[in-house]
Image (tube, rainbow, N blue to C red):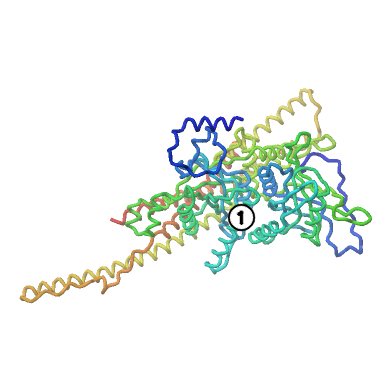
Amino acid sequence: MPLGPPSSAIHIQPAVSPHMQNAPRTPTSITIHPVALFSILDHYLRRKDDQDRVIGTLLGTRTDTHVEVRTSFAVLHSETSEQVAVDMDYHRAMYDLHHKVNPKEVIVGWYSTGSNLNTYSALIQNFYSQETAPHQAIHVSLDTGVEPGQPAGVKGYVSSPVGVFPKPENCVFVPVPVELRFRDSERSGVDLLTSTALSSSSTSSQPLSDLTILESSIQNVISMIDRVLTYVRAVLAGEAKGDAAIGRYLMDTLGASTDDLEKGGFNGRLQDTLMISYLANLVRAQAEVSSRLALVTAS
Amino acid sequence: MAAPSMAAALAASLPAPSAAPTPVAPTYEAIPPSMSTLIDVEAEISLECVQLDGLVVSKILKHACDSSSSSPIGLLLGIDLDGVLEVSNSFALPYHSGDDDDKSAKSVARYQASMLRSLKEVQGDDSIVGFYQASTLGAFFNQNLIDLQAIHQDKLRHGGVVVVHDVSQTARGNASFRAFRLTSAFQDAYKKSNFSTASLASHQLTFSSILEELPLKIHTNPLLSAFLGEFSSPSRNALGSSSASAIPPSFSVLDLNSGGLTKNLEHIVDALDNYRNEEGNLAYLSRQIARERAKADNYVAKRKEESAARVAQGLAPLPEEDVTRLFKIPPEPSRLESMLQLGQVDAYAKSLAETTSTGLVKMYAATAGSGV
């Protein structure tokens, strides 16, 4: 699941050298939670007029070679042609606040908007590397796609020093693959946002009933079946060349039969569900009556 | 140069200022006429709907999944504009399992203040408009929520709202957010902290009339919409073949196995047990009250008889006595707790009914093709 425009970068995984066994390894993959992304976008929208880009801290968890970004917060900074300044007090204070709510999440790196990696990026990277020591800090650059010619997307980097005498303002940003990740239970929330975003007014009203969602899902399936059907008809009519792989997939997917439903206690389950449904409605009715009776006994 | 001329036009249309010298006011930008009807300093335009930003939706979702507490709480930040309460940001409140109530309340207040200050520094919204609470299986009635909302409704502009998010329904494939506030009848009773039977009857209070629901909308800003659109459409990789999108379509709602019914049933039984206990307590207390009252009545009747007898014998009647001092009639117990318990029972049952009804539809749909 790539999060950005295609890149020709080769992701190199350095071999572990024997004398470096104890040192933490370089992260080779980054996953990012939607919340972190959305916060960055929000921060970008709220930037000042004179700010070209915004930066902030990424919080998350890390395993041996994998970094999971769970959330992010904005950090004040200023860039001029002569110098760059990051409000470290603010960064620390904000981190402490986040730490209170989610003690498991630690600083893993920083983000910036725009795809411009310059000397200041190296300096900020150097600052965050001190914060995350002994682990390496990651850098996520989010391209908002507002500037023409630059497609929207997210890129991840780790840094390594460059030159004979490493200096903080010099470093190489090595690209690392980034993926979007969220829990299965959050899935429906992301779906909700996606469908909202695709609607014409960018708003949707709540709450939806379960049946509405079921209906839209079934509609979706129907349209997919229609697409498959058109394809299959085209192949049968000889208009398109059949793809054996697609044929296999279709066979596997559509070969399932509903004969098993009669066995396997399906009907039993159906009746159980009916029973529970009656029970639930009975409880509701009783609760309603009881609440009314509580009012009547007053007189 | 449109704005100054507009301001001049506005100024010309206003009645001439009185002769009294006005203090030099700071100059503000003129408010465009299209917005002038929306100026609402005294919060006179009543709220008609709540609008959640995409960021808030995802923040609540994450907090609900991460939190160790059963009902995680956070604050909503935003602004109201022309009857729409726009919630643009939120932050989670730390969870205290601790027993030290006073201390934890203070630390939450400190946390809240410093968080608001920090958000203000990065141009975030910093006015609290309500709070959110995540719940499981639709059961959000509890004392905590009512207390917090009552405080908010007193202090916040427009009284604030509470947004309730249902974790278990979201896991089933329907992310649900609902906005509520306390009804005026309930607030009235709450202010007098009088939940006796008579007060309930006069306010017509049942569990369903504690909270009133406000319509809720989800909104995504254009930048977020663009990103989501980008993620959900299949991208092309360097080789030219299309690869999967970052958010592939999901069909988990079509899953026939409507799990969690057993747990839901257990919750109902537990809630019913709690309710019965509470009702038992209430019944015990009201019996005690009745007993004490009967005693008092007996005593008064006896005294009246005696004094009547004394009058008949030509003696002076017994002096009037304060009965209430002799007999301590306990105050009538609050029925709020029992009402909330009943609300929980109803909420669990409602969620169960909804799950089963959707399950039934899916089951019949699955068998429809096989001709069973």
Q: Quadrant of the N terminus of chain B?
A: top right
- Where residue B247 sits: x, y (%)? 71, 42
Q: Name the one closer to the observer, A76 or A26.
A: A76
- Where residue B161 sits: x, y (%)? 50, 49
User: Considering the numbered disc 1 on the image, is that residue within a helix, a strand or a loop?
Assistant: helix
Q: Quadrant of the C terminus of chain B?
A: top right
Which of the 4 quarters of the picture holds residue B306?
bottom left
- Residue where numbered disc 1 is placed: B117
Relative placement, left or right, of B312 versus A189 is left
Identify the residue shown where x is 56% and y is 61%: B109
- Where residue B62 sits: x, y (%)? 64, 52
Q: Amino acid at mark 1?
A: Arg
Relative placement, left or right, of B69 versus B297 is right
- Where residue B298 sits: x, y (%)? 21, 71
Query: Does the rendering let one see residue B372?
Result: no
Identify the residue shown where x is 82% and y is 46%: A117
Q: Name the one closer to the observer, B32 or B77.
A: B32
